[in-house]
Amino acid sequence: MLTVEKKKKYTVADYMLLEEGAPFQLINNDLIMSPSPSLLHQLILGEFYDAIKTFLKENKNKGLLVLPPMDIHLDEDNVYQPDLIFISAERINEIIKDHIEGAPDIVVEILSPSNAYYDLRQKKDIYEKYGVKEYIIIDPVQENADVYVLKDGSYQLPQKVQKNETLHSILLKGFSVELFKLFK
């Protein structure tokens, strides 16, 4: 087991020495620790997960929907644990090992005070670089969501959804959720 001490750069090898379930992510060679999420964060996650899971079942979609904690290994400097991960059926065998190796199709992050900077900046840039096709950021404080879609190698923001509006997935054709239902 790795004893976390201040070091200039950490690698995936260092990360893999951590105790299972340790509250860390490897973000640009830094081990970033997060406290457990707030109750509001978890309630929003549960509502969003239920909405997508219901949609996938009703549409007989064979993609894989994964709740945290689950590592996604993007490179030697970055191992993330997003709030929600979707991998299309066509890509499951391509990126599933003991963990997820490579970019999922959709990543959902719910902002918390301790992670907002990383989710909005560093992780967003890495998700874009490695080809996460749709990146959904839900903000419980502002009660809104941003849906980024990868187009020609960079993120576009086709939707900035307010509480009284409906979020539509670009990748999961036909999936939508009224945002107010996540914040009730």
Image (cartoon, grey):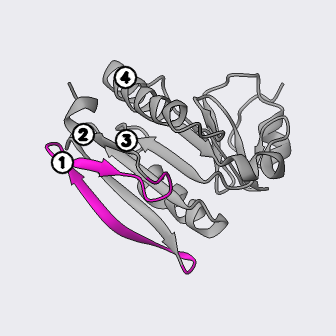
Q: Which mark is residue 165?
A: 1
| Mark 1 crowd level (few <14, some 14–19, many ≥20, 10 Å Cα) | some
Residue at 35% x, 18% y is 39
**Amino acid type at image mark 3:** Leu
Which mark is first along the chain, 2 or 4?
Answer: 4
Name the residue beneath numbered marker 4: 38
| Mark 4 crowd level (few <14, some 14–19, many ≥20, 10 Å Cα) | few
Q: Nearer the viewer, mark 4 or mark 2?
A: 2
- In space, the residues marked 2 and 1 are separated at their CA atoms by 6 Å
> Contact, CB < 8 Å: mark 2 with mark 1?
yes
Name the residue beneath numbered marker 3: 111
Residue segment shown in magenta: 152-173
Q: Residue furthest left?
A: 164
Residue at 27% x, 37% y is 140
Secondary element type, mark 4: loop
**Amino acid type at image mark 2:** Glu
Q: Nearer the viewer, mark 3 or mark 2?
A: 2
Q: Nearer the viewer, residue 71 or 88?
A: 88
Name the residue beneath numbered marker 2: 178
Residue at 58% x, 29% y is 68
Secondary element type, mark 1: loop
Which mark is first along the chain, 1 or 4?
Answer: 4
Residue at 61% x, 54% y is 105
- In space, the residues marked 4 and 1 are separated at their CA atoms by 24 Å
| Mark 3 crowd level (few <14, some 14–19, many ≥20, 10 Å Cα) | many
- In space, the residues marked 3 and 1 are separated at their CA atoms by 19 Å
- In space, the residues marked 3 and 4 are separated at their CA atoms by 10 Å
Secondary element type, mark 3: loop
Which mark is first along the chain, 4 or 3?
Answer: 4
Q: Residue furthest bottom?
A: 152
Q: Nearer the viewer, residue 7 or 50?
A: 50
